[in-house]
Amino acid sequence: MPTYFGIQNPRGSHGCYVNSILQALWHTREFQTKLNLYNHHTCPEGREFCLLCALSAFWYQASEMRSDDISSMSIREAIDEIYRPRNRFKVGHFDDAVECLNAFLTQIHKIMVGEPACDDPKQEPLDFQSLDVCPQPCLVHSTFGMEVVEATCCPKDHRGEPTPSMSALLYAHGESVLRSVEAQPHLCFEKAVCLSMSRRAEACSERDCKRQSQWHRTVLNIPRAVFIGITWTEVPSLKKLFAFLRIVSEELNVPDCFDKASTRSSEERSHVITSIVCFYPAGLHYVCYARHLGEDNWRRFDDAAIKALGSNYSNVIADIEHNHYVPVLLGYAFPPSNDKPSRAPPPQGQGVAFRHRQSPRQQYNHHKGASKPSPSQLSSKSTSSSTTT
């Protein structure tokens, strides 16, 4: 059974941002295993083939095929259909990888719990934080869900009304992380992430108190896996890029990314880094560095092109620096106790078209043919390389 694969990105299709996110999700073993075992769902009303159908078929191919690369076109078409009214994630057009991940997790949750689409398609949520907590956690909530409570507190310890929310991603501001570590050289990566989060100040709500209150964040649970999106005000200089890469920790203690944690994981293991999605500003291109935890080997996935980097994390950092890539997404997860991949059952359930119940070879041929978009789907800015966005 293959443990890694390339993903096709035909000339002019600009699919590198989707392909990089798929690699990051595949190398999140908790998510990979659970999606492999998930074989029934009901498509949203009015659709015979949905995003979860496409992901299930893709996961099945990735688990069963021994081909050099597979197609993500059906996934791109499914996410395009959902967000077309918002003019996002269109087939043949370039888009933001981190926002695509957020949209993926949002829509997987909505399909699994049977939540209907918005009455106004232009208001279809992109942000996982806009969703409610699952009564019985779905795949996304059980793997990535973080219950966070925000509340204000002034120097006199006057506390405001707590505001709970559910998040699947953390965000850190790259320049703020650098400034925090520059000011406090011994500061750990997690605390730098915590300090980089938006901390708006406002007047204390307590009568007669003239102090300024600061927002503080408390995490109530420790997720099985976590993604950290890195935002940049501008393209960092090489000096800033190299400095940031040396701050990024290979292990992550999630509670330290918050002001306070009301609970600790029952497992003593730290999260370990499993993926780094990077952006190449000069070429408008994304790549994914991913680590197979069972083999403890890193690889660079540039669409269908794969480069082995060995088990040493420093090789990854050196390769990112050499190519002048900018990290925009960090993936961390608990190392699985049993690293043997689960065999994916053939996708079933309403909306899974008959072609996806064909043999693996027939499925592969179908998706290989589907990877060639029509001229109307291609961007006018076609490129000359099959691995270029």
Image (cartoon, rainbow, N blue to C red):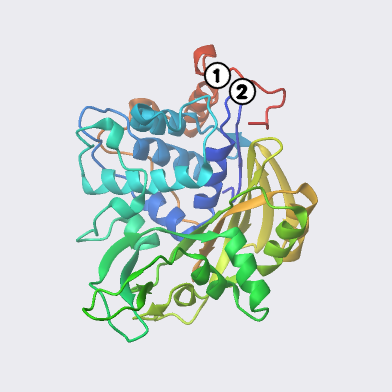
Q: State the residue position of label 2.
A: 12
Dot 2 alpha-carbon crowd within 10 angstroms: few under 14, some 14 to 19, many 20 or more: many
- Asked if residue 61 is positioned above or below residue 247 in the image, the reply reads above
What is the three-letter code of the residue carrying label 2?
A: Gly
**What distance separates the C-alpha of mark 1 from that of mark 2?**
6 Å
Going from the N terminus, do you reach mark 1 or mark 2 first?
Answer: 2
Image x and y of residue 288, in percent:
62, 48
- Asked if residue 5 is positioned above or below residue 229 in the image, the reply reads above
Is disc 1 in contact with disc 2, using a CB cutoff of under 8 Å? Answer: yes
Judged from this view, the residue extending furthest toward the bottom is: 156
Q: Which mark is residue 378?
A: 1
Dot 1 alpha-carbon crowd within 10 angstroms: few under 14, some 14 to 19, many 20 or more: some
Give the quarter of the image for residue 352: top left
Image x and y of residue 221, in percent:
35, 73
Tell which of 99 and 25 is nearer to you. Answer: 99
Tell which of 139 and 279 is nearer to you. Answer: 279
